[in-house]
């Protein structure tokens, strides 16, 4: 009777071990999915080429999946003349941070988890360029933003240049006319090269055959499900987590069976 009771207890222990391992692995998969979800930060500077003495607005959008503690720090190098907060908002709400300090060197904001929800939190502050700033002087903003203690990267604008050229949306400075001129020059160069090749008796059919071959190869790769050039292979984070969970569960089952067999032999 005692031996049978011991066997039953060992079976229960085995099931408990397997269940615990499955729950731990599942929690890891869910945590990884949340960490790699739609949590991001993007900064916009309304004037990246101000003059000395101008005031510039710095707008940072932080996207959250759920309520979370947000630690926000912007450090300026060199320091601005001054910095003041403009507004905090999330949708129609106006969350109030538990910490907010701003000066020419650093801007610090901390939101409590209870004050935020899923969606985009916007932090807007203004900085003043020193009156004695020289043309061409560059001011950089380095951010440290943490969501529940985990740091995330910040995209968008990260600097401004006094008296410089306003950056376009593509991240390049200058006017559209210059860009068009460069494009026209490139087209002229391509036409000249083609004309020269034809005059020298170069057989353009080879190029056409090469292009056709490349297109056919690309089409073949698409039909076979391979990733073509310019595309990124999809990540398989969820699949890897599932395999890890199965592997851990199997290992726990083997260990539990071994322990049960050893217990039975000892009895």
Image: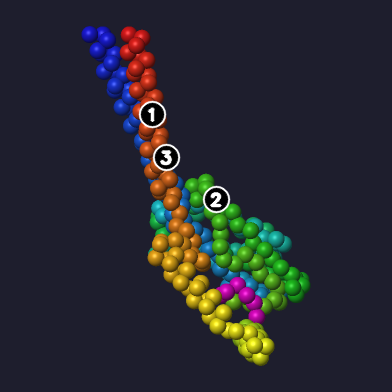
- What kind of secondary structure does the magenta stretch mostly adopt? loop
User: Residue shown at 53%/80% (left/top)?
Assistant: 208
Sequence order check, earlier mark of 2 and 1: 2
Q: Quadrant of residue 139?
A: bottom right
Q: Nearer the viewer, mark 2 or mark 1?
A: 1
Nearer to the camera, 207 or 129: 207
Quarter of the C terminus within the rendering: top left
Neighbour tally class for label 2: few under 14, some 14-19, many 20 plus, Cα within 10 Å: some
User: Can I make out residue 149 in this image?
Assistant: yes
Sequence order check, earlier mark of 3 and 1: 3
Q: Which residues are magenta?
A: 169-174
User: Residue shown at 43%/70% (left/top)?
Assistant: 219
Rendered view: 118 above or below 190: above
User: Residue shown at 59%/67% (left/top)?
Assistant: 157
Q: Are marks 3 and 2 in contact (CB under 8 Å)?
A: no
Q: Nearer the viewer, mark 3 or mark 2?
A: 3
Q: CA distance from mark 3 to mark 2?
A: 26 Å
Neighbour tally class for label 3: few under 14, some 14-19, many 20 plus, Cα within 10 Å: some
- Residue of label 2: 151
- Residue of label 1: 252
User: Residue shown at 55%/83% (left/top)?
Assistant: 205
Sequence order check, earlier mark of 3 and 2: 2
Would you say 5 lies left or right of 251 here? left
User: Can I make out residue 181 in this image?
Assistant: no
């Amino acid at each position: 009777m005692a031996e049978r009771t011991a066997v039953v207890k060992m079976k229960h222990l085995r099931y408990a071990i397997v269940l615990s391992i499955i729950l731990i692995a599942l929690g890891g998969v869910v945590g990884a999915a949340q960490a790699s979800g739609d949590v991001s930060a993007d900064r916009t500077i309304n004037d990246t080429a101000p003059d000395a003495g101008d005031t510039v607005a710095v707008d940072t959008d932080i996207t959250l999946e759920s309520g979370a503690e947000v630690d926000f720090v912007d450090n300026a190098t060199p320091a601005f003349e001054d910095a003041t907060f403009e507004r905090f908002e999330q949708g129609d709400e106006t969350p109030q941070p538990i910490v907010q300090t701003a000066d020419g060197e650093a801007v610090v904001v901390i939101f409590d988890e209870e004050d935020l929800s899923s969606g985009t939190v916007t932090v807007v502050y203004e900085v003043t360029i020193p009156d004695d700033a020289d043309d061409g002087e560059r001011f950089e903003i380095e951010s440290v933003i943490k969501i529940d203690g985990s740091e995330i990267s910040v995209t968008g604008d990260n600097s401004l240049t006094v008296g410089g050229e306003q950056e376009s949306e593509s991240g390049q400075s200058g006017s559209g006319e210059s860009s068009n001129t460069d494009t026209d020059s490139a087209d002229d160069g391509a036409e000249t090269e083609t004309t020269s090749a034809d005059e020298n008796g170069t057989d353009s059919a080879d190029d056409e055959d090469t292009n056709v071959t490349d297109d056919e190869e690309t089409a073949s790769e698409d039909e076979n499900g391979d990733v073509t050039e310019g595309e990124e292979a999809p990540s398989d984070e969820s699949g890897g987590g599932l395999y890890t969970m199965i592997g851990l569960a199997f290992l726990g089952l083997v260990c539990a069976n071994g322990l049960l067999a050893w217990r039975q032999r000892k009895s």
